[in-house]
């Protein structure tokens, strides 16, 4: 979901309800201590006590392989008011993995332990430190070692995506393997991967034995999914379209027009999985590049400004 799921979409999706906590997109840490402005640009929720506008907490996610540098940046985030620190050991992107970030680190359980331990020691005791992992890099041979290293390093919980890096996002996710990790750890394990429907969620919980789920692409494809899991009625397309418009309004001031339309089409592309109306909407804008033209096609003409809007 790179290029779509940022703080604007977090705000929109979490406003629907049913979400207990969000995690930021990963913040890449290499060899320097990032200035506060970088953190607040990527995660403006830091300026609101680490909360979305709707009050949902957001945990800052770091990605990197240098324990000392990660610890220093985690300490800075703590000072900026982060609700918690999450460590990304699950990203399968080739560009990230080539630079020793994300899921490739699952081949090095000892390094995972050092990273988690360094971050845990660098931030206040009351600040949660969590992690996200996959079942492995090329295979699952080090799956349990990696998970145990993360827990022993001091993580308070771990999210497990039920595929290896090599498997990418190819179905199915192995929820039973998540259960094998859960059985070995004394910290909560949260299941993730291929949860698109209520039925998927129920099967995932049953096969993994987990008590909680992390929703990713499933929530982007169906913004009402978290509420559905809590017994609410399905969200109709008439309620989704205003969310799409709000997202367009959120990104308009900071995303160049040539990229803004692409973001809307990316979200529509995922919405097609659940809403027939999204397919028709996507087809109507697929060949368009101009953001304003796309927005007019989706939402109709913008309301005229009132002549009294600036009257004092």
Image (tube, rainbow, N blue to C red):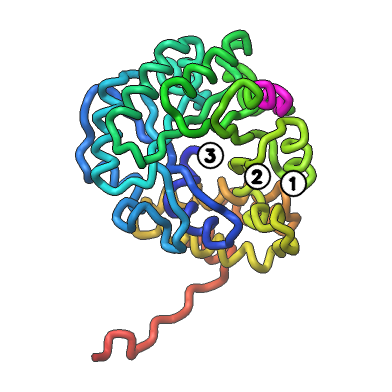
Labels 2 and 3: the sequence-earlier one: 3
Disc 1 and disc 2 in contact, CB within 8 angstroms: yes
Which residue position is annotated with label 2?
218
- Asked which secondary structure carries label 3, the reply is loop
What crowding class fits label 2: few (fewer than 14 Cα within 10 Å), some (14-19), or many (20 or more)?
many
* Labels 2, 3: front one: 2
Name the N-terminal-most of marks 1 and 3. Answer: 3
Residue 8 lies left or right of residue 31; in this view the side is right
Q: Residue at x 38, y 86 (%)?
A: 306
Few, some or many residues within 10 Å of mark 1 (<14, 14–19, 20+): some
How packed mark 3 is, by other alpha carbons closer than 10 Å (few <14, some 14-19, many 20 or more), is: few
Say above or below: 143 vs 245.
above
Disc 1 element: loop
Q: Check disc 1 and report the residue beneath it.
A: 197
Q: CA distance from mark 1 to mark 3?
A: 18 Å
| Of residues 170 and 82, the one drawn nearer to the viewer in this rendering | 82
């Amino acid at each position: 979901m790179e290029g779509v799921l940022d703080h604007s979409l977090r705000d929109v999706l979490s406003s629907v309800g049913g979400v207990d906590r969000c995690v930021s997109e990963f913040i890449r840490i290499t060899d320097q201590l990032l200035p506060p402005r970088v953190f607040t640009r990527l995660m403006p929720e830091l300026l609101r006590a680490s909360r979305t506008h709707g009050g949902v907490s957001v945990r800052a996610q770091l990605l990197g392989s240098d324990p000392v540098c990660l610890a220093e940046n985690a300490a800075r985030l703590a000072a900026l008011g982060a609700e918690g620190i999450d460590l990304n050991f699950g990203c399968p992107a080739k560009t990230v993995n080539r630079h020793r970030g994300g899921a490739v680190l699952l081949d090095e359980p000892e390094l995972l332990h050092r990273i988690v331990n360094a971050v845990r020691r660098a931030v206040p005791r009351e600040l949660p430190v969590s992690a996200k992992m996959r079942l492995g890099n090329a295979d699952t041979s080090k799956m349990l070692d990696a998970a145990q290293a993360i827990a022993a390093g001091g993580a308070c919980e771990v999210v497990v995506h039920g595929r290896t890096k090599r498997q990418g996002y190819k179905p199915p996710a192995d929820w039973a393997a998540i259960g094998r990790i859960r059985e070995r750890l004394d910290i909560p394990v949260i299941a993730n991967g291929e949860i698109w429907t209520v039925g998927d969620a129920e099967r995932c919980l049953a096969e993994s034995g987990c008590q909680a789920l992390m929703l990713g692409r499933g929530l982007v494809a169906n913004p009402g999914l978290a509420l559905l899991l809590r017994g609410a009625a399905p969200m109709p397309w008439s309620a989704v379209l205003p969310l799409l418009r709000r997202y367009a309004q959120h990104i308009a001031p900071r995303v160049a027009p040539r990229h803004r339309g692409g973001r809307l089409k990316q979200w529509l592309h995922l919405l097609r999985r659940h809403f027939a109306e999204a397919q028709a909407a996507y087809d109507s804008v697929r060949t368009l590049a101009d953001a304003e033209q796309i927005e007019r096609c989706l939402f109709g003409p913008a309301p005229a400004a009132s002549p009294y809007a600036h009257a004092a």
